[in-house]
């Protein structure tokens, strides 16, 4: 975990936000104490932890600063004053002295009364000026809950600062809240966002929709302190391949209309749009493809040489992609679900390797490639697409049981199967 946050000796880490600040601070401390001396402090107030058989705390009081002798494998906690079992705020002057004694200092610099969102006072957060990193903790478990005093700290102040007409907490509330950047007021060091309590595909999907709208911020992590899972977020570009000739179909299969009146390509794009991607690309060859790309918000790339095979579409799409991963989706996958796309993308977050769906032991599409394969992908030739890379590179299998949604249409005979499958929509 410390490798993910890139915490090194000499770092002073301030933690702001809500939904796990204290837990993250102690979690980090327990990891870092194996590598050097660790101090915990607060510039707000925190409950004094209890000493048990499972933890090792040394409490430091102001009169002891001049005689300090920090010990490895212990968590040192600075207690300038304790009121009602709460450790009060440390003064910057004391932290200036204490930082000379410790390899790592972790500071809780913000209070939120155990609520996911808050209205900010002008003096918040109280970040120690010599902090080398500030981690803002985001808790999105308040999504769809009522907006009131029980869900939002200083509710009236929050309404003045982030007013939206909706009566429940929605994604736009989080997007505005995060983009205000108040988490990092007076922070001079590295700025990190950490989305906590992402413990399911559903919560990962909500996170993905929010993070796609965050402005000018690349240093993003997500996971679960409770589950001890931490991942650095890698943005993904869907690249839809729609410039094939459909030779076995004897016609343009992507323009074929399903029973719901939508074409195969239109349904494919509709399902992709159930995830709020930051960047989307469609590689096509005619006005039908162009019109649909504009309708669904995809960047259109014209393939002027489709006769060169599928690899040409892969090269064109990859060349225009700017994010950390590329997921190649054939235009004839009208039943692909949001959940399956999320599962593939989540596996990529965990492993940062090529992710290949497998159905009943057989490879399928869509395949996701990390950006490190940019050169390989843009050097492809012929009709094999990325399959040539799979022959020589390690990849992660992402297993699925439902072959229905991975069904693609290659021949006229497939339409008979399609008519049956459509009944399951």
Image (cartoon, grey):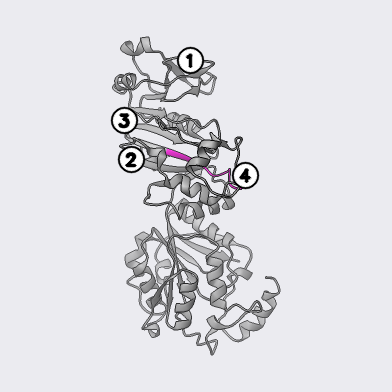
Provide the residue span drawn in magenta: 136-145
**Few, some or many residues within 10 Å of mark 1 (<14, 14–19, 20+):** some
**Cβ atoms under marks 1 and 3 closer than 8 Å:** no
Q: Which mark is residue 190?
A: 2
Disc sitting over residue 145 in the figure: 4
**Main secondary structure of the magenta stretch:** loop
- Front residue of 384/104: it is 104
SS for callout 2:
strand
Q: Nearer the viewer, residue 218 or 412?
A: 218
Quarter occupied by the C terminus: bottom right
Q: On the image, which quarter does residue 105 sit in?
A: top left
Quarter holding residue 141: top right
Mark-to-mark CA distance, 1 and 3: 24 Å
Labelled disc at residue 82? 1
Mark 3 touches mark 2? (CB < 8 Å): no
Crowding near pointer 4: few (<14 within 10 Å), some, many (20+)?
few
- Residue at the spot of label 3: 129
User: Which type of secondary structure does the marked residue at label 3 adopt?
Assistant: loop
Q: Is residue 213 magenta?
A: no
> Compared to 328, does 188 lie above or below?
above
């Amino acid at each position: 975990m410390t490798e993910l946050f890139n915490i090194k000796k000499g770092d002073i880490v301030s933690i702001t936000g809500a939904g796990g600040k204290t837990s993250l601070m102690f979690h980090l401390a327990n990891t870092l104490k194996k590598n050097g001396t660790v101090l915990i402090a607060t510039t707000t107030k925190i409950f004094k932890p209890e000493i048990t058989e499972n933890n090792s705390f040394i409490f430091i009081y102001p009169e002891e600063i001049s005689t300090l002798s920090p010990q490895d494998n212990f968590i040192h906690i600075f207690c300038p004053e304790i009121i009602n079992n709460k450790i009060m705020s440390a003064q910057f002057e004391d932290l200036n002295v204490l930082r000379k004694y410790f390899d790592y200092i972790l500071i809780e610099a913000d209070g939120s009364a155990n609520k996911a969102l808050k209205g900010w006072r002008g003096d918040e957060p109280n970040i120690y000026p010599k902090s080398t990193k500030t981690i803002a903790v985001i808790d999105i478990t308040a999504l769809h809950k009522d907006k009131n005093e029980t869900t939002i700290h200083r509710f009236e102040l929050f309404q003045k600062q982030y007013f939206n007409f909706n009566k429940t907490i929605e994604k736009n509330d989080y997007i505005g809240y995060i983009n205000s950047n108040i988490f990092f007021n007076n922070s001079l060091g590295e700025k990190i966002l950490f989305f906590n309590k992402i413990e399911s595909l559903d919560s990962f999907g909500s996170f993905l929709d929010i993070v796609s709208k965050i402005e000018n911020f690349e240093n993003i992590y997500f996971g679960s302190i409770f589950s001890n899972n931490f991942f650095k977020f890698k943005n993904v570009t869907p690249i839809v391949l729609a410039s094939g000739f459909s030779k076995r179909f004897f016609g343009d299969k992507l323009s074929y209309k399903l029973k719901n009146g939508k074409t195969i390509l239109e349904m494919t794009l509709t399902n992709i749009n159930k995830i709020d991607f930051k960047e989307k690309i469609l590689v096509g060859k005619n006005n039908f493809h162009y019109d649909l790309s504009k309708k669904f918000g995809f960047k259109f790339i014209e393939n002027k040489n489709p006769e060169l095979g599928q690899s040409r579409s892969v090269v064109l799409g990859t060349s225009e992609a700017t994010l950390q991963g590329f997921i190649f989706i054939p235009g004839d996958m009208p039943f692909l679900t949001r959940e399956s796309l999320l599962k593939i993308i989540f596996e990529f977050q965990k492993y940062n390797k090529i992710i290949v769906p497998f159905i009943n032991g057989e490879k399928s599409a869509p395949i996701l490639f990390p950006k490190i394969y940019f050169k390989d992908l843009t050097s492809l030739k012929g009709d094999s697409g990325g399959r040539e890379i799979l022959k020589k590179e390690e990849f992660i299998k992402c297993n699925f049981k439902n072959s229905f949604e991975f069904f693609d249409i290659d021949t006229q005979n497939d339409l008979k199967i399609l008519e049956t499958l459509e009944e399951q929509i």
